Structure formats: C-alpha cells, structure tokens
Amino acid sequence: MNQDYIKANKWSIIEEGFDTDRVKSSESLFSLGNGAMGQRANFEETYTGPSFQGSYIAGVYYPDKTRVGWWKNGYPEYFAKVLNAPNWIGIKLFVNDTELDLATCKKVSDFRRELDMKEGWYKRSFNALLPNNVEISVEVVRFLSLYLDEVGAISYKVHVLNTDATVVFEPYLDSGITNEDSNWDDKFWNTTHMATAENRAFIEAHTMKTNFSTCTFMQASLDYNGQSIKGTFGTGSETYVSMSFSQKVKAGEELTLTKFGGYTVSRNHPENKLIDAANKALDKASTMGFEQLLQKQKEAWASIWEMSDIVIEGDIKAQQGIRFNIFQLNQTYLGTDSRLNIGPKGFTGEKYGGSTYWDTEAYCIPFYMATKDEKVARNLLKYRYNHLGKAIENAEKLGFSNGAALYPMVTMNGEECHNEWEITFEEIHRNGAIVFAIYNYYRYTGDYSYIPEMGLEVLIGIARFWYQRANFSTSKGKYMILGVTGPNEYENNVNNNWYTNYLAQWCIRFTIEQIKKVKEGYPKDYNRVLGKTNLTHKECDEWEKVADNMYFPYSEEHGVFLQQDGFLDKELVRVSDLKKDQRPINQKWSWDRILRSPYIKQADVLQGFYFFEENFSTEDLEKHFDFYEPFTVHESSLSPCVHSILAAKLGRMEQAYQFYLRTSRLDLDDYNKEVEEGLHITSMVGTWMSIVEGFGGMRVIKGMLSFEPRIPKQWELYSFKVNFRNRIIKVTVSSNELMFELTGKEEIDIRVVGKEVKLTPNKPVGIEVKH
C-alpha cells in the first residue's frame, strides 16, 4: 500500500481535503466512462498545478512511428497511441475579473470529491478564497450518459459567499491538445472546421494518418434565480471556441451553468454528417434536461448492478474494492460493439498504447460471460475473427507461411503495435490465450455455433503457427519452442517455457478435435472452411506429430515442471530473503540483473495450472505452488488474482485473502506506485475472479456448473450472481450456510461440494456448512 486517502465506503469513492500531490492520482481514480468515451477526473476550471489531462474516444488512435536505435526485421512499424481527444469539459470561471484556479487560491477548504458507483456520477465541491479575497463555494456534478452514449453532462454551481460580485463563466471546446506520451512529438489532430449556433459550438477534427473524423460539441446555458441568462461567443482561435456568460450577483446567491458535450465520430456516422449527428444528440439531451438524463443514468446503472454486483458483509474495504473494479470494467466496455475491445487502461490513461492485449481472452471474458448476455463475450471473440487476416499478415512478416496466424501482443486494428522486441517477437503465448477463450466460451455458454461459423478458421491459423514455430531436436527426439518470453516477462529469450509449450500442444489437439466435430455436425461450414484454408488431412497429421512429441522441461529433484530449461541454473534466492529496499525490483534493479534472477513477475507455470486445472491433481498444484510462489514478486497487476484462486483451491484462505486484497485495491491503494498514469482496467477482473472462482470455487465440469465455496474469516457473508446458459443463479456464502437461488423458468442441476443439487426457479436451496 502506497496511499490511504480514499475513505472507506460501500458504494462511493470519496476524497476529503485538497492536496496538490494527490491531484493526478485522483484524476485516475475518479475517472468516468460509458463504453463509447471516457475522461480522467480533470477539473473543469483552469488548474495550473500538476495534472494529467485526458479525454478519450473508444477506438480512436494514432500510429506513432516506432522509435528504436537498432531496427530489426519484422519490427512493428508503429506503436499505437491512445489519443487524448479534444476537450469538451472546460469551463473557465472569473469572479470580479479574477480567475478560479485551485493552484493559486489563498485557501481551499471543505474540498470533497465523490464518485458514486451505484448511480454513475461524479461530484466535486469546495470553498475557495480567491487572490482578490472573494470567497466562493462550488459544486460540480458530472456524468457520461449510458442512455445517450455520445453525451456527457455537467452541472456547475457557484455561490459567492462574502460580497456582491460579477461572475463570468466561459465554457469552451479545445482541440489544441497534446498527448502525455509521444515518440516524436507529432501533431496528432488536425482541426478542420468550427461552427457555432445559438448556445451550441462544434469543432470538427480528424486524426493524422488514421483519419478518424470527429466532432466535439457542446451546449451551455446559465440559470440565475430561475431565469436563463444569454451567452455570447468569443473570438476564439483555430482550435478553440468559447461562450461567455456574465451576471452580477449578491452575496449568497447561486448561479448554475449546465453544459452538455461529447463526440460524434465517423465510425458511427457519415463523415459529412457529424455536426448533424451532434445536433440530434444535443436535441435529445436538452429536451430531457440535466435531471432527467441523470435519472436515466441511475436507472441504467441499477440494471447493471442488478446482475454484476458482489455483496460483501463485514469488510468495508473489500466491498469498496470489488465494486470499484466492477464499476470501472462496465465504464470501459459494455459489449455492444464488436469493433471495440477492453484496453488495459480503459479511458483513464495513455500507457501501454493499445486497446487489446491477451488480458481480454485470459481474464476479461469470464467476467463478461457471467455478468452479461453471452452475446457480449461472443462479440469479443468476433473481434479476433475480424482480425484474422491481420494476424496472418503479422506472422508473414516474421517468416511464417501457409496461413499461420500470430495474433498481436498489442493492437488497435489487428496489426502488431508493441515496440519491445522481447514482447513482440517472443511473447507468443498470447496466441494460446485466444484458443483457450474459444474453448472457455463454449464450455461456459454451451453455444458451439461460434466455432463452425468463425472460430475454426482462427484455430487453424493458430495451429499452423505452433506447428511452424516448433523445431525438432535430434538430441532429445522432441519438439522444442526456442527463444520465447512466457507470462513471466522477467525472463526473455528463454528456451522451452513450459507454459508456452503446454499451450501449443493443447491448442493443436483442441483444433484437431474441433475439425472432426465440425466435419460431423456442420458439413457446410466444414467444406467452406476447408476451401478457404486449403487444409488437408496430411497437414493435421503433421500437427499431431508435433503435439505428441512436445518437450516439457522437468526437474526430478524438485518434482516440478521447470518454467524454462535454465531455471535451475539461477541463484534461487526466495523473495522473502530480499531486502525491502530492493523492492520493487523493476524500479530498483537493472534489466540485466532482473533477467539473471529467479524472480517471477506473475503466474507462469501456475497460469497453466489455472487454465488447465482438470489436467493436474491437487497434489501437483500444491507442489508447483509451493515451488514457484516464493520466487514471485507480483509486480504485474495480473499476478495476485491467479495466486488467490489457486491458494483458495488449496484451502489456504488467509493467503488467498491477502492476494484478493491486493488485486481489489491495487489502484485505490496504489500498490505499484503508478496510479496517476491510469487504472489497471483489465486486471480488475481478477478481483471478480478471486471471489467467484477462488472463494466461490465456481467451475464448469463436464457441462455442469460446480461450486466449492469457502469464505475468508474476515467476512460475515458474500454473494454474487452468474448468468449460466441463460439461467441466473445467485450464490450466497456465510460461515455456516450456502444458499442458491435460481431465476428464470427452467430448472438446472448444479454440483455443490461434489454433490448434485437441483435448483428450481424462485425456490432457494440452503445447504448447511459443517466444520
């Protein structure tokens, strides 16, 4: 834990007191999103203190040319930048000709922020003594509408407290923005057109190179004692347009500026109709008004929480943590658009430079399958199918042929856009995560249709890659996969990473199994796919030969699979024996020293035990957990959740609980000392997984939903819901009872602690827990 200023609350994130050192962290923590756009919690008014300005539009990016000292063949040509979009939230405030700026005020008191996760709005309030000795109080409420996802709304209220004054509001749009992160300091946006009409303003701009056309828009109105005050437009500039509202007020009187704003983009509208689309969005928003639109926001979030909420009793920080993570996941991705995916920072920052990592398939899909309609998870799989052509191109650039597909480590449009060679060329296990997601989707939903319709082509492309990537060792008589980076990125360019080799073998066998299944059950799809891919029986036989003869490094001495061939050649000093001033090693040590160390960034061999749990005994898991966890530094946001799930399976609940706390409050408590750069969105699903799969012990075994519930001693009770094959099951766990409730029309058989239980709709089943 590196910060502890967020107040414990079941449904809200609350900060009290103004501290300039916390501003950038809070801009991340209080960020907003609605799946289509998002923004950091920047102040609407001018702020000259340290700040990370950020507004983002889903799917809009810039291909920043890769900058390296030594170019290698096959290197990605660009590193995709998540773009800071034109700013629509800005509102300058002047009182008696002095501008409000919290960095220059004589005093700021009663400062409070609240992000209400239950209802989906963000409020900020404070008193400020300006340099001219005028004291004001301000209350701002902001939200990004789920009902009208192109629109955001701001209510900005000002009281002048100690004197009569002239108050001037200047709401504005600004497309002259820059990114925090840039390789060459390129200009990312080109402003093409500006327009105003009555109380509305529009700036059309397109991204350089990618030519995403956008219209940033606003509508502003000022209310004073129930009267609407007319505003005027200023002179502006090529990238800036503002309105001005001026009003004399007496001490104690209130002014309220209401501002609607947002974006229309060429992904959703004709390029020459963006202002028309913006006007239509503003018409709807203004007809409803701020309060009615806010009410719609509350209703939309109530619907989301009805299915996705996890209740924890007896541990308020754990409760706050899980809800914060679920809230941010839903702000980032709602599953309505198969062209979009789940970026690792979502709408909270620019780091990592892509919208899609293997995080989506390995971690996110289980959450979206269980808390939403299965179509949402299917859209995530469709996203990969739509990028299959690019994955084949990516493999061709590295010398692969015959339709072999290598999905990118990082992407915006299917092309690889990660600029570290040890990741781009070598962290190829991401291919296997996609195959596992296809398997996991079918296993959970029972919907096989994705595989014959789309998935089989993806499986064939990936199987071809694994076949070509393996090479035969005459000395060992086995197939090896050399020069790779596994999930543990603290080992680069190693040979025979066990997890990668195991995935390759499993992917090939799973693909062959699906080819046979589609041939038997879906002959039209089978013939279409064979015609498209030119697949032959001989080729499948060659794949099988590789799978059957895959090499797996193993230590007879320790009785464990080795993370890679040379793991035991390292000096095996456990993490517990490291001095505290050496942690985190990724900030204290040279990369050379890290690569020679035994330290593991995140689950690697144990990632395989998590994915393929049914292939190993509990004794095998315990032996591998005890060997590898002591060398794990957990310096990846994805690390604690897998370890929490596995620790819970082993019955080590205190250890599982500590891992859970770390994943649930990773950002709230800033464990990695980097929250000001943005939140760890894709790792947030680990919190959900830790409870549902870890403590709840949820699995799908031979098509049946199964539970092995446990409860941390710190909790009195926890409950969650899952949508399993269109049946909603609520699970409640306490120290002495398990309760299962089924919503719907059809019965379902589930397995609880190894015994079958029949659930009937609206008839709760209680099971006593014996100690």
Image: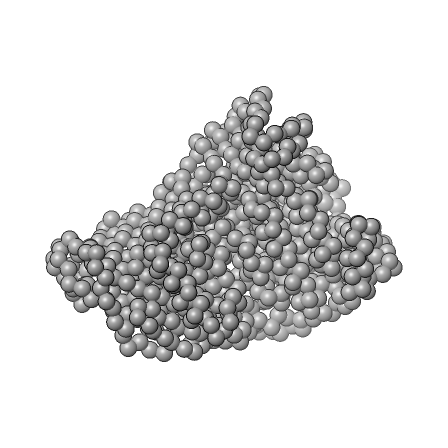
| Outermost residue, right side | 538
Q: Looking at the image, can residue 26 be seen?
A: no
Q: Position of residue 575 (x, y in %)?
A: 56, 45
Of residue 198 and residue 530, the one placed in the foreground of this image is 198
Q: Nearer the viewer, residue 459 or 417?
A: 459
In the image, residue 270 above or below residue 543? below
Q: Is residue 731 left or right of residue 25?
A: right
Who's the residue at 69% across and 40% down the image? 613
The C terminus lies in quadrant: top right
Q: Nearer the viewer, residue 706 or 759?
A: 759
At horizontal 44% and vertical 31% (from top left) the residue drawn is 314
Residue drawn at x 34%, y 73% as measured from the top left: 196
Give the x, y percent position of residue 97: 18, 67
Q: Is residue 533 left or right of residue 651?
A: right
Quadrant of residue 389 in the image?
A: bottom right
Estimate the x, y position of residue 565 in percent, counting from the top left: 72, 52
Residue 280: percent from left, percent from top: 42, 65
Q: Residue at x 43, y 78 (%)?
A: 192
Foreground pick, 203 / 696: 203
Q: How is the image coloured?
A: one colour
Quadrant of the snapshot with the N terminus = top left
How many marks on residues? 0
Can residue 325 be seen by looking at this rendering?
Answer: yes
